[in-house]
Amino acid sequence: MEQKQVKLMDIALARSGDKGNGSNVGVIARSPEIYAFLDKELTAARVADHFSEIALGGVTRYDLPNLNAFNFLLEESLGGGGTETLITDAQGKVHGLALLHMEVNIDESLLSTIKHD
C-alpha cells in the first residue's frame, strides 16, 4: 500500500485546556478507521516525545473508543499552572494545535474514509 506523510490535523481534530499544572489534549479521529490507525500510531510515548520540552512529568493516554477519541494528560506542562506562571499559554490552549502539527505516515487508502462536509 502507498504511504503518505500527513499532519495529524489532516486526519483528526483536537481540543486542549489546563488541569492544574498539566494540560489535557483531546484528539478525535475523523473516521473509525483513522481511530484504529491512531490507536497504534499515537501512543503516549510518541506524544511525550513530541512534547518533551514542556511535558516534564510525562504523558498518559486515555482511550475513548466510543467517541473515536483519545485524551492525553501532559503532566507538569504549564510551569506551575494558570495562577502561578508567567508563560504565554498558562492554560495549554495551544497544546492541541501543537499536537495537530505532528506528522504521521498513513496508508493512502485510509484517507478515503474521511467524510468531507
Image: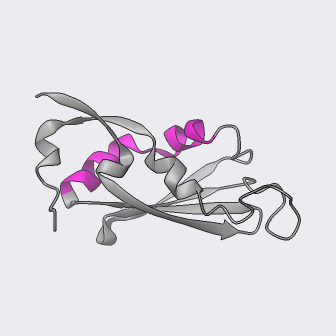
In this picture, residue 21 sits left or right of residue 74 = right
Q: Residue furthest right?
A: 84
> Which of 14 and 66 lies nearest the eye of the viewer?
14
Estimate the x, y position of residue 115 in percent, counting from the top left: 14, 62
Q: Which residues are magenta?
A: 33-51
In this picture, residue 82 sits left or right of residue 2 = right
Quadrant in which the N terminus appears: top left
Estimate the x, y position of residue 23 in percent, counting from the top left: 65, 61
Q: Quadrant of residue 17?
A: bottom right
Quadrant in which the C terminus appears: bottom left
Estimate the x, y position of residue 102 in percent, counting from the top left: 45, 40
Colour pattern of the rendering: one colour
Above or below for 30 versus 111: below
In this picture, residue 52 sits left or right of residue 83 = left
Above or below for 51 versus 3: below
Q: Residue furthest top?
A: 2
- Kindly identify the residue that appears in the image at 75 percent across and 54 percent down: 76
Q: Quadrant of residue 109?
A: top left
- Kindly identify the residue that appears in the image at 28 percent across and 55 percent down: 35
- Kindly identify the residue that appears in the image at 50 percent across and 38 percent down: 46
- The number of callouts visible is 0
In this picture, residue 69 sits left or right of residue 22 = left
Above or below for 19 versus 74: below
Estimate the x, y position of residue 37 in percent, counting from the top left: 27, 46
Q: Is residue 42 magenta?
A: yes
- Kindly identify the residue that appears in the image at 61 percent across and 42 percent down: 51
